[in-house]
Image: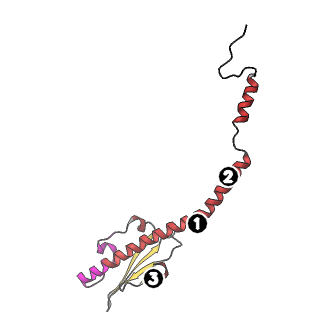
Amino acid sequence: MEFPLAAGREPGRSRRSQWRGIASRARGFTLIELLVAMAIVATLVALAYPSYASHLMKGRRAAAQSHLMELAQRQMQYLTDSRSYAPTEAALGVTAPAEVSSYYTIDFNVQAGPPPSSTITATPKAGTAQAGDVTLSIDQSGQKTPANKW
């Protein structure tokens, strides 16, 4: 009397030999292959991260520059209206965007004169990712410092 074969089982092969065939066909990665792949990824990250961090720093600096330009323009309007420079952002009716206020401190240096003068400065906050950046400033004549960072 012959018994029917189990589903998927080849005639003449024992269960053990059948499993050995499946195991040899379903091979994974070796430890060496995995380590090589991890080394390649680590190298790419080590090369890309400093560039990415620099790109973010430049983007935050550009936001601060844009805000300083807006403040300088508002300062000129304020001078025309009141014959003096505004001492704060609040006097100009402006608040710093979150991307600027999180990384920079905005200061006004106003001198009554004669002639009156105004300098607006954005100083990077200590303890932030922008801490290593330069201090940006713009005066009443539009002079921007440092010139090589504008």
Query: Residue 37 shows which numbered tag?
Result: 2
Say which residue appears at 73% left-offset and 30% top-offset.
Answer: 21
Disc 1 target residue: 50
Residue 141 vertical placement versus 89 (above, below): below
Asked whether disc 3 touches disc 2, contact meaning CB atoms under 8 Å apart, the reply is: no
| Three-letter code for the amino acid on which mark 3 is drawn | Thr
> Element under label 1?
helix
Going from the N terminus, do you reach mark 2 or mark 1 first?
Answer: 2
Q: Is residue 115 magenta?
A: no
Tag nearer the camera, 2 or 1: 2
Quarter of image, res 10 = top right
Range drawn in magenta? 74-95
Image quadrant occupied by the N terminus: top right
Q: Residue at x 42, y 70 (%)?
A: 63
Residue 48 is situated, as x and y percent measured from the top left of the image, at 59, 63
Image side of residue 9 versus residue 97, left or right: right
Residue 135 at what x, y percent from top left?
47, 77
Mark before the other along the chain sequence, 3 or 2 = 2
Outermost residue on the left side: it is: 81
For the residues marked 3 and 2, what is the alpha-carbon distance in whole angstroms? 46 Å
Q: Tell me if 116 is positioned left or right of 6 in this view.
A: left
- At mark 2, the secondary structure is helix
Q: Is 133 drawn above or below residue 141 in the view shown? A: above
Residue that badge 3 annotates: 145
Residue 38 appears at what percent x and percent y? 67, 53
Image depth: mark 3 or mark 1 in front: 1
Determine whether the residue tagged by mark 3 lies in a helix, strand or loop. strand
Depth check: 25 or 39 in front?
Answer: 25
